[in-house]
């Protein structure tokens, strides 16, 4: 574990290590040597690390509550205890929520512990109903419709070509797709293909323009949003087999099994988009039964 100077931003990683925010070794390990953006915030937002900063008797903790690693949080707790600040600001990333100020390290730690417990209860609900298995893009069969879509994406260098993507997804993937738009901290439904197997037909229009996390079955959609943000941050295709039981009021849980391709894209105006396409190729069965 490194022991950086106290007054600079620190990064608490998912192994409990503490790094100066701009440590060359940290950047080397994360393959981001030339990243010019706010690295501590980016790591906290997308990888579940925690960022911390102290100045005099004040300290700041920055984290994404839904993603923060338990090990990273524990390292941050020790750091706060050592600093013994008289004022702690907790700055939340992810879905918009106000920052909170606490009058001691103990009060801030208690708040973070409570948030982690609440999050873990939500994760437990999601994990009982969702299984996912990552796949290599190289394993997609030559005739896979997902491979064809991947080739269109690669030929355009990750630029979003709406006519080409939508025409292909309509013809080869039976309109089983959706487009997500990144709007600041939020991910918002931009376009939803009518071929998705959704039992509530009103959802196709009601969801457009609304954030991912504000959908029915919130634990499931928070899980989806986390995967989507990671794909956008990595800026590379992601293929997964999914076996999920999704709650659709008032119908109850509906099981869906599919292979999903996520393609991070950039629109002509610079907007970041994610094109998500589903395929029923192969038989996805990651559980004997989804509860």
Image (cartoon, grey):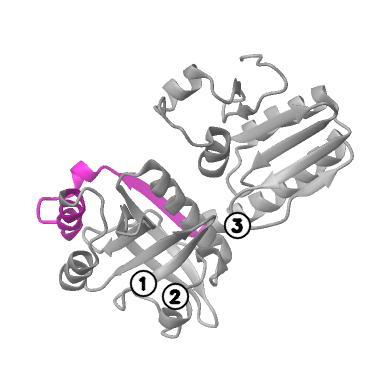
Please state if 23 lies on the left or on the right of 262 as rendered.
Answer: right
Say if mark 1 contacts mark 3, CB within 8 Å.
no
Q: Residues within 10 Å of mark 1 (few under 14, many from 20)?
A: some
Quadrant hosting residue 2: top right
**Considering the numbered disc 1 on the image, is that residue within a helix, a strand or a loop?**
strand
Give the residues in magenta. 128-154
Residue occupying the far front of the picture:
269
Question: Which residue matches tag 2?
Answer: 208
Q: Is residue 172 rendered to the left or right of residue 124?
A: left
Estimate the spatial distance between the alpha carbons at disc 1 and disc 3, rounded to whole Å: 21 Å
Q: Is residue 147 visible?
A: yes
SS type, badge 3:
loop
Residue 191 shows which numbered tag? Answer: 1
Is residue 176 inside the magenta stretch? no
Q: Position of residue 250 (x, y in %)?
A: 55, 83
Q: Residue at label 3?
A: 95
Q: Establish if 90 lies above or below 40.
A: below
């Amino acid at each position: 574990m490194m022991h950086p100077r106290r007054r600079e931003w620190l990064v608490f990683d998912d192994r409990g290590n503490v790094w100066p925010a701009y440590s060359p070794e940290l950047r080397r390990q994360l393959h981001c040597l030339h990243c010019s953006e706010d690295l501590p915030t980016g790591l906290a937002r997308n990888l579940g690390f925690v960022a911390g900063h102290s100045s005099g008797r004040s300290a700041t903790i920055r984290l994404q509550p839904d993603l923060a690693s338990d090990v990273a949080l524990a390292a941050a707790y020790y750091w706060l205890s050592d600093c013994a600040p008289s004022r702690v600001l907790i700055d939340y990333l992810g879905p918009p929520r106000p920052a909170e100020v606490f009058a001691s390290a103990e009060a801030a730690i208690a708040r973070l512990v409570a948030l982690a417990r609440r999050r873990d209860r939500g994760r437990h609900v999601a994990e009982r109903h969702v299984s996912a298995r990552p796949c290599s893009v190289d394993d997609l069969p030559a005739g896979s419709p997902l491979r064809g879509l991947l080739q269109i994406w690669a030929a355009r260098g990750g630029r979003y070509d709406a006519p080409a993507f939508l025409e292909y997804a309509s013809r080869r993937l039976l309109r089983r797709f959706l487009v997500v738009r990144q709007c600041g901290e939020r991910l918002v439904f931009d376009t939803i293909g009518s071929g998705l197997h959704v039992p509530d037909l009103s959802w196709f229009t009601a969801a457009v323009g609304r954030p991912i996390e504000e959908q029915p079955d919130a634990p499931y959609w928070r899980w989806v949003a986390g995967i989507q943000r990671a794909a956008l941050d990595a800026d590379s295709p992601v293929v997964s087999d999914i076996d999920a039981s999704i709650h659709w009021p008032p119908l109850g849980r509906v099981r869906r099994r599919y292979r999903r391709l996520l393609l991070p894209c950039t629109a002509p105006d610079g907007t970041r988009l994610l094109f998500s396409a589903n395929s029923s190729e192969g038989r996805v069965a990651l559980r004997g039964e989804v509860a």
